[in-house]
Amino acid sequence: MASRYFIKRNDNTYAYESISERVPGKKNPVTHKKYLGKVDPETGEIIPKQTRNMPKKLIAKDYGSALLLNHIQNSLGLREQLNESFDYLGDWILAISMAQAISPSELMESNAVLEDSFIPEFLGLNVGFEPQLISELVNHVGNDRFGMDLFFKLRTGNETMYTFDLKSVSKSRHVFGWNEWGLNLDNELFRDLNACIVTDKDGLPSMFNLFPESSPYIETLRRNFDYIRRYTPEGFRLVMDSDVDRADIIVPLIDRNIEFVMPADANARPFKKLVTRAVSKMGETVRVHKGRAYKVEELKLGVVIEKELNVYLTEGDEGFEDAARITAYVCYDSLKAAEEEQRIMVEINEIERRLNGKMFRRPTFAFKEAAGNYEKFLDFSLDEDGAMIVERKRNAIAFAVNRIGTFILLATPGISWEEVMMSLELRRRIEHLFRDYKIVIDADRIRANDLVSARGQFLIKFIAMILRSKMDSVLRSSEIDNVLVDNALRSLGGLRAVGGNGTWSLTALTARNQLILEAFGIEPPKTVKF
């Protein structure tokens, strides 16, 4: 007869069935044990054991990189924001963006990445990503201005934003494929693409604006400002490249009450006198930023436009009281100065070694070619035999050495030196990210014959930028050596889910991949979960 019994392990109770039977040739009966299942703690019923048959054909999918990207998008709330903005298309947009983050390609080729990845399983998508479907999705998203506006509002929230204006790209030359816009409805070629990417203070992209037309630079800025202000009630800060001789930049920014930060060329003509004054006032007091010491002199400047150029005035100069005001931080980095002086002296010594005592058929050409950028520090003559004698311009070298390590930062009054340094550091990160977008994220292959399609494609690749930017930030702050976004994704791609028909198992997790996952707060997976 069969009898049931129960065994309790930890917090679970398991049911078994025992059957005794007589076996010829044996004195005592033989007992067989059979596992029945787990006991439901609430109803007391036995949950039958489920048996899974392994699929006849095994497949392997990239689980590691999909796991990481899904963790990141969850932490940033991207899925919820996309679904709120684009309804049922949100998961599709996110899936293609995650595929673009893993392996840059034309959007229409994302289906190959998705078929090899566990991304569809994480997002609950079980329909194929055919190129035609992706094309229709891109156009639908590009047309949905309401959905895009809502997504930007959800991404920006109420934070003070940092803007990074990206200059227009001419249609007359090929730069990373941006001239692949095709024809508009009037059958006229777009001449330029103007684009602006906005980030938060941590460097994560929040929104963008782009429009294909040729406009003066300040007009492009103004249009971007008006667009951005729709989403940033708390205001924003424009962090720019050095552009000190642009008369149409600084004064309009001041007139429009727009915060800005920009570096200036300490060797440029408008600032030579300013640097001389500031250096003479610098004491021994230092300011420290990220473990590096600087001497800093803070000056109040007036700026006026004369003959279409910015003229900078200091206190005591005529017209200072009536001029628009900005702050200039004149900074001296002694470590950089020492390194740069060493480099200059080594280069000058090498040029002298190559030229001194040598005879050349065209000595002027030979000198210019060898001296290159260091020609301003050197001169030459020929001895009675025609051999070259190189001489150093002592005053020129001394003047340059005195200015080495000195740099100028311009800002709206009220922005502290620490904030300026952090803003420019953020600018460098975003410039790196945008280069990454144009090269690694494959903007070279954007193919769009109208603005609608271009906008839809840009959004998908923009979300890929958000994912990669977050990865970059975490990896840089981690203790893992020499691991950047691309090699981290490639490494995680080796963690595969093997199986099919709902039955999956994981390949071995390497020590390197465990470190990467732990850097993002992800526990090393033991089983496939989605």
Image (cartoon, rainbow, N blue to C red):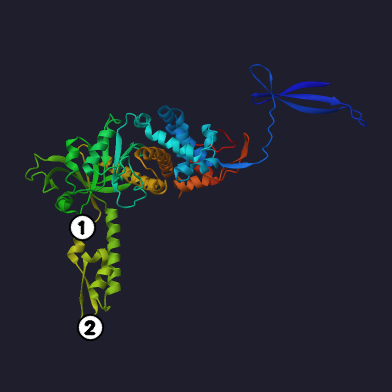
On screen, 169 above or below 19?
A: below
Q: Residue at label 2?
A: 385
On screen, residue 302 versus residue 261, left or right, reads left
Location of residue 133 in the rendering, given as x and y in whole percent from the top left corner: 48, 37
Tell me which corner region of the image, top left, top right, bottom left or bottom right, holds residue 357.
Answer: bottom left
Tell me which corner region of the image, top left, top right, bottom left or bottom right, holds residue 364.
Answer: bottom left
Q: Which quadrant: the N terminus?
A: top right
**Mark 2 vs 1: CB contact within 8 A:** no
Location of residue 400 in the rendering, given as x and y in whole percent from the top left corner: 21, 59
Tell me which corner region of the image, top left, top right, bottom left or bottom right, holds residue 196.
Answer: top left
Residue type at mark 2 is Asp
Give the crowd class for mark 2: few <14, some 14-19, many >=20 residues within 10 Å. few
2 or 1: tag closer to the N-terminus: 2
Residue lying at the far right in this picture: please name it.
25
Measure the C-alpha gap from mark 2 to mark 1: 37 Å
Q: Residue at label 1?
A: 402
